[in-house]
Image (tube, grey):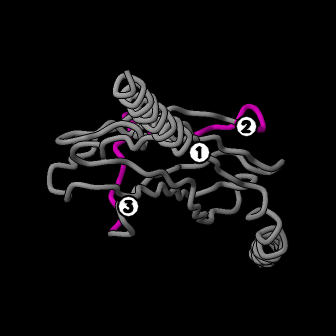
Amino acid sequence: MGRTVESIVFLLLVVALSFQLLPLARADVNCKAVILSPSADTSYTDLMALNFTAEWTKGNWTEWILPRYFYSIDNGSRVSVITEPFPYIYFEDMNTTIAINDTIDVSNLTDGMHTLTLYADGTVNEANLILYSVNFTLSTTHFQVGDLPAPRPSPLFSAILAVAIIAVVAAGILVYFKKRKH
């Protein structure tokens, strides 16, 4: 009977500590991403590379995290990013950066500019006692499907071109009147 009471007290202590540590632990894990591809200055037609790095930052109690990555296009439904192998991140340092590469089929999208938003979530283990979930919106980028729009001349170029045309026309008129007087 004494052993059972000790076990129940220990279990209650662990549960109480879990509820005390949980709010602190959730603030201890963060993820940031840098999207390397796609980019707005490249046009895509069929397949588009999705390349990014994810930097996970942990707190003092974090042992590991099982991350998952998703993207959405134009605020559509989230699509899972394939990561091979599907790794647990065991933290040896406070920061861990991993590179993710996937391919997205954009052949069904209309021509024009689109928005890609990157997300991450994961299960975090704190002090080998507490498991909880985290969710992050990581980054947003824009990309072009179909032909890139033709580049427009800059306002400075347009002004220089207008001045040049006026100068050529004025010189032509001046030459015409000079020859006509003789």
Residue 33's label in the rendered image is 1
**Distance of label 1 from label 3 (alpha carbons):** 15 Å
User: Label 1 is placed on what type of residue?
Assistant: Ala
Q: Quadrant of residue 7?
A: bottom right
| In front: label 1 or label 2 | 1
The residue lying at 35 percent from left, 60 percent from top is: 73
Q: Secondary structure beneath disc 1?
A: strand
Does residue 62 appear to the left or right of 42 in the view shown?
A: right
Which residue bears the numbered disc 2? Answer: 95
Q: Quadrant of residue 97?
A: top right
Callout 2 touching callout 3 (CB < 8 Å): no
Magenta part of the protein: which range? Answer: 77-95
Please check the rendered image and state whether residue 83 is part of the magenta-colored stretch, yes or no: yes
Callout 1 touching callout 2 (CB < 8 Å): no
The residue lying at 48 percent from left, 32 percent from top is: 167
Which residue bears the numbered disc 3? Answer: 72
Quadrant where the N terminus is found in the figure? bottom right
**Distance of label 2 from label 3 (alpha carbons):** 26 Å
User: Label 3 is placed on what type of residue?
Assistant: Ser
Task: Point out the tag, 1 or 3, that comes first from the N-terminus.
Answer: 1
Q: Secondary structure beneath disc 3?
A: strand
The residue lying at 30 percent from left, 46 percent from top is: 149
Please check the rendered image and state whether residue 93 is part of the magenta-colored stretch, yes or no: yes
Mark 2, residues whose alpha carbon is within 10 Å: few (<14), some, or many (≥20)? some
